Amino acid sequence: MLSSRVLRSVSELSYAFLVVITIVAAGLSCAAIISQAVRTSPTESWANNFNALVIGASYLVLFAASISLCVKRRVAVRLKLQRISRTYRTIGREDLPDSVHKYVLQEFTRSCLIAYESLPKNVHHAGWGRPGTEYSGIQFRRALLDTIPRIDDLAHVVIPLHPKLKPHSRMLHHFRFLNPLLPKDEDGISSLHYYDSAVQLARNSARALTEEEFEIGITAASQIEKCLNECRLEMLESDSMTQLDVQPPKDPNL
C-alpha cells in the first residue's frame, strides 16, 4: 500500500500533466487554425485579416474564461475549508436545520427501538446468568475463578508469610491457614469448604456451573473476603493503638 504522501504527489503530478497537455493542444490548434485563415485569405497575409483576428480573440476569451473558472473554484474551495473548525467541537442543536435534526432524532429513536426489540428474552445459556436477573451477562466460571487472586491478596495482607498461589492447588489446602479465622455453620463447615467445592467444579467439571452452584461459591467468597477485611481493619487499629502507646509523653515544661 502506498502512503498518503505518495498518492498526493502522484495526484498533483497527474493534474499538472493534464493541464500542460491541454494548454499545448489548445495552442497547437490555435496556431493551426490561424495559419489556415492566413493561407485562405485573398492577400495570404496578416494584414486586414479579419478571420485571424476573430480566431485569436476567441482563443484569448477561452483562455481568460478558463483562468477565471480555475481561480473561482480555488477560492470557493479555500473558503469552504476555512469554515471547518480546526479544533474538535461537538455538533449541537443550533448547528443543524430543523428538518435534519428531526430526521436524525427519528432515526436514533427507531434504532433504539430495534435494538431493544432484538434483545434476547427468556433465553438461558448454560454457565451464564439469565437475562433480567442479578447475574445477567455474567459467566459463572470466569467470575468465580476471578475471586481467587483477590482473596489471595487479602490473605497475604493478613498473613504475610502465607504461601504463594499455585495454578492448580486446591483452595482448601492453599487457604488452610485462614480456616481458623472463618466462622462455621451449624454443621461445622466453614465457607472455605463451600468455596473449595465450587472452585473444583468450575475448574474440573465437564458441564457448566449452575446458578445455584455459582451462588454458593460466590457467597462463600464474599464471606471469606469480608472476614479478611475485618481482620485487616483490626490489624490497622491495633497498629495505630500501639504507635500511640509507644510515643513518649511530652514534657510540660517545654
Image (cartoon, rainbow, N blue to C red):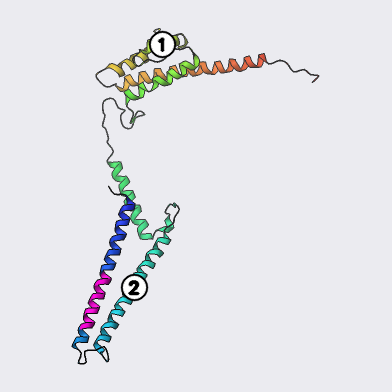
Does 34 lie within the magenta span? yes
Q: Which mark is residue 190?
A: 1
Mark 1, Cα crowd under 10 Å, few <14 / some 14-19 / many 20+, is: some
- Residues shaded magenta: 22-35
Question: Can you tell which quarter of the image residue 150 is in?
Answer: top left
Residue 21 versus residue 190 in the image, above or below: below
Residue lying at the far left of the rendered structure: 40
Residue 73 in the image: x percent, y percent? 35, 68
Q: Quadrant of the C terminus?
A: top right
* Residue 96 within the magenta-colored segment of the rendering: no
Q: What secondary structure is marked by label 1?
A: loop
Q: Which mark is residue 67?
A: 2
How many C-alpha atoms fall within 10 Å of the one at disc 2: few (<14), some, or many (≥20)?
Answer: few
Q: Secondary structure at mark 2?
A: helix
Residue in view at x 40 percent, y 18 percent? 221
- Counting from the top left corner in percent of width and height, residue 59 is at 28, 79
To which quarter of the image does residue 10 belong?
bottom left
For image coordinates 35% across by 12% down, the residue present is 170
**What is the three-letter code of the residue carrying label 1?**
Ser
